[in-house]
Amino acid sequence: MEANQISYPLRRHATIKEWSPRIHYAQFQRLPTGPLPERRIYDFELLYVSQGEAATTMLGQRHHLSAGQLIVLPAGVFHQNEAISSPDTRFLGIHFDFFDELDILTEADMIVSEDHVQYHRFAHEAVTDGFQPLSQEPVYTPTLACVQLMEQLVQEFTLRPIGYELACKALMLNILTHLLRLQPLRSRSLATPYSGKLMEIIEEMERQPDAPWSNAIIAERMNLSLDHAAKLFKGMAGLPPNEFLHNVRHREARRLLRETDLSVEQISEQLGYSGIHYFSRLFRKHEGISATAYRKLSRVL
């Protein structure tokens, strides 16, 4: 087969112990409204939307991404990203390969120049028994724990303390595991006739986390019993409704602490928490530090 007729992404069946991811780039990004040029990359990218909305057109399909979702961009596949929100959309991007097979010296080394394509450099996607390839259905809604791991990876890669390479590899393996474990939940949710209504509710919770969401409200919206609605919700979102809502609120709280000068009390009120003391206690429980300390640390990085 001619090099330009190869089907991408390239895939390699491998046992879990053969996975050895290497990080080439990990950073928060802010992009102004509008489409970026179409491109291909030699490695893989996890592109997570931390604020706003975005879209990626790939293999003839346009994928819409809301805040809290990520897309897997595979090596060798043409794609075009677009920031939809105004004045900008904020991302967390991680470039990596699965088998430590690429030497990346600069960011330009990750992007394919179509005038001089180096076909031997396209990275392989690891595929293992029990899971479909991560890029096969490329859009994911990661758990709060997974998002925290991605942010920790960015911190390690940015500060580069002694042993950061090993820390990044361990974090990336954990992130990939989280995404793989979402696949069975997502597959089961696609089989329910309520999936469309559930997705509407989930997207509304993402947009309005301050609203008084409850199991009873969700069950009423779906015209189902409390237990049945909660079970279907967990099947699609991977978490019960109350935990999912907390994850959305906590993620938004961290964003507001990083990106605004709102007081901790104002953030607590804006996100629908019952009081600043409750908010502060939950924040410390999940982050290990206070909201004020988190704000100071985030502005150092």
Image (cartoon, helix red, strand yellow):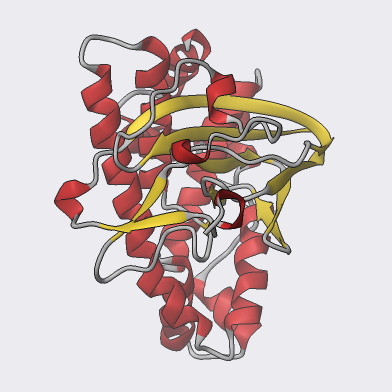
Q: Nearer the viewer, residue 114 or 246?
A: 114
Residue 87 appears in the figure: no
| Residue 78 screen position, x and y as percent | 66, 49
Give the quadrant of residue 118: top right
**Residue shown at the point (33%, 34%) measured from the top left:** 101
Viewer-closest of 279 and 252 = 252
Q: Position of residue 60 (x, y in %)?
A: 73, 64
Quick check: can you spot residue 56? yes
User: In terms of image quadrants, where is residue 194?
Assistant: bottom right
Q: How many marks?
A: 0
Question: Which one is in front, 181 or 45?
Answer: 45
| Residue 286, x across and y down, in percent | 33, 38
In percent of the image, x 78 and y 37: which residue is there? 37
Residue depicted at x 46% and y 50%: 247
Residue with the most extreme front position: 2
Residue 58 vs 22, above or below: the answer is below
Query: Which residue shows up at 54% across the image and 60% down it?
Result: 7
Of residue 297 and residue 216, the one placed in the foreground of this image is 297
Relative to residue 73, is residue 292 depicted above or below?
above
- The answer to whether residue 28 is left or right of residue 129 is right
